[in-house]
Image (spheres, helix red, strand yellow):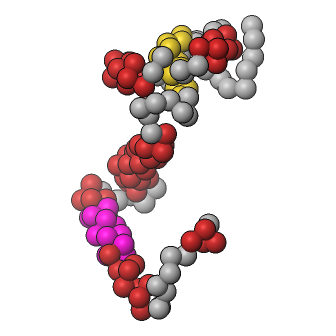
Amino acid sequence: MTTSFFDISDNARVLVAEENIAAEHSLCKVLNDEGLITTAANAKNARDLLKQEVYELIILDRKLKGINVLSLARFFLFGARDVWFVVALPVFLEEALGLNFSEIGGFLGLWVVGYGIVQASAPGLRRFWRQTQSPGASAL
């Protein structure tokens, strides 16, 4: 049995979307003992496969034509945020703080309204502080 730096269950589905045939073969050779591998030669095939099946691991060529990697990252980032806000936070509020359904809904509603007020007031606060220039890369 071979070991690798990641752990995939015996029946994990892996999608490899790679236009370079040599790179695809290398990835498949490494992953062959780890799970069930499906390959896609281009972005259209990868999208079609993702509509048909759920994969535990997706390996994408970052230069794959037709896939905007930044958009894909945002999709997963916002999806994770939504799962936290819709599932984990309400469970925490109920279990740890003992809030009931209406109290949780009220809290989350107030949070969304408050967050919107903060976002809407940001440009006005920047003008009030006389900050007309973007903070730029130094803010990072």
So how many labels did they put on this image? 0
**Residue 61, x across and y down, in percent:** 55, 29
Q: Residue furthest left?
A: 102
Rendering quarter of residue 29: top right
- Spot occupied by residue 77 in the image (x, y as percentages of width and height): 46, 47
* Near-viewer residue (71 or 133): 133
x and y, in percent, of residue 12 in the image:
53, 16
User: Residue 116 falls in which quadrant of the image?
Assistant: bottom left
Principal SS element in the magenta part?
Answer: helix
Q: Quadrant of the C terminus?
A: bottom right
- Residue 118 magenta: yes
Residue 20, by quadrant, is: top right
Picture coordinates of residue 106, whole percent (x, y): 26, 64
Does 81 lie within the magenta span?
no
**Whether residue 27 is situated above or below residue 6 in the rendered picture:** above
Residue depicted at 46% across the width and 30% down the height:
65
Q: Please report the bounds of the magenta region as a residue range.
A: 106-119
Task: Determine whether 29 is above or below 55 in the image.
Answer: above
Q: Give the camera-side residue of 114 and 129.
A: 129
Residue at 55 percent of width and 75 percent of height: 135
- Can residue 40 be seen at all in this image of the molecule? yes
Q: Nearer the viewer, residue 11 or 62?
A: 62
| Residue at 49 percent of width and 86 percent of height | 131
Q: Is residue 92 left or right of residue 22?
A: left
Query: Vertical placement of 70 versus 110: above or below?
Result: above
Quarter that holds the N terminus: top right
**Residue 110 in view here:** no
Q: Is residue 81 left or right of residue 14?
A: left
Which residue is at a point 53% across and 28% down the rendered structure image? Answer: 60
